[in-house]
Amino acid sequence: MPVGSNLLSRRGLVLSASCAVLAGPGVSHAARRATPNVLFICRHGTVKSPIARELMRRQAAERSFALTAFSRGLSIEDQISPGLAQALRADGVDIWSEPRLPLQASDIRAATLIVLFDSLPTAVSKPTRDWTDFPSFNANYARARAELDVRLSRLLDDLQGRAPVSGAAAS
């Protein structure tokens, strides 16, 4: 073997080892993955999915975890009671920061994970979370908010690699 190629091989090994050290324990496996796109879907697109979107963003920011959260409705219809609107404002949850949009096929394609507050009319081949048993925010905001905080925390744990996100329904 020529001397030059042996030297190149040694340099390659040193470079590889240096990269391994730099990317070692200080860089988490989750940080090396692509940013997840989480789609929340509810029937009317005005209560559960936008609240989940905003609180997911808040929890992710608290963890310094990058993700994209967006919400859609199967058919857009305002279902926010005056009491719920007041509770959201008092809690600093601005669901009005983005327009309410109906679900499109492109939304499904853009998502890496879909959270369903209502059943879709057709199956999707993406990982999903079935939260169709979720309580009403209009009926009891405090109860629904507490439940959502727990579910979002578990979901973020999964997305951060603490447990696998599966295609199976989970709460």
Image (tube, rainbow, N blue to C red):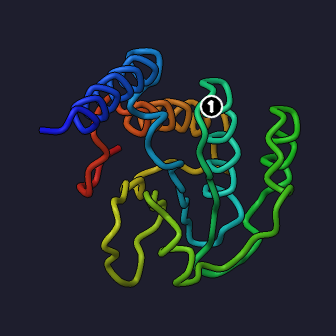
Q: Position of residue 28 (x, y in %)?
A: 43, 25
Q: Residue furthest front?
A: 2
In this rendering, position of residue 150 left or right of residue 48: left
Query: Image quarter for residue 149?
Result: top right
Kindly identify the amino acid type of the residue bearing the numbered disc 1.
Gln
Q: Position of residue 1 (x, y in %)?
A: 12, 38
Q: In this rendering, is residue 74 above or below 169? A: below
Query: Residue at the spot x=66%, y=68% of the render?
Result: 45
In this rendering, position of residue 70 left or right of residue 22: right
Q: In this rendering, is residue 81 above or below 107? A: above
Query: Image quarter for residue 12?
Result: top left
Q: Nearer the viewer, residue 125 or 122?
A: 125
In this rendering, position of residue 141 left or right of residue 43: right
Quadrant occupied by the C terminus: top left
Query: Residue at the spot x=66%, y=79% of the render?
Result: 102
Give the number of marks: 1
Query: Residue at the spot x=68%, y=31% of the render?
Result: 61
Q: Position of residue 134 (x, y in %)?
A: 47, 50
Q: In this rendering, is residue 85 above or below 152? A: below
Query: Residue at the spot x=58%, y=39% of the render?
Result: 144
In this rendering, position of residue 145 left or right of residue 95: left
> For mark 1, does the 10 Å Cα neighbourhood hold few (<14), some (14 to 19), or many (20 or more) residues?
some
Local SS, label 1: helix
Q: Nearer the viewer, residue 36 or 49?
A: 36
Mark 1 lies on residue: 59
Q: In this rendering, is residue 125 above or below 33? A: below
Q: Position of residue 113 (x, y in %)?
A: 43, 57
Q: Residue furthest left?
A: 1
Q: Nearer the viewer, residue 139 or 25?
A: 25
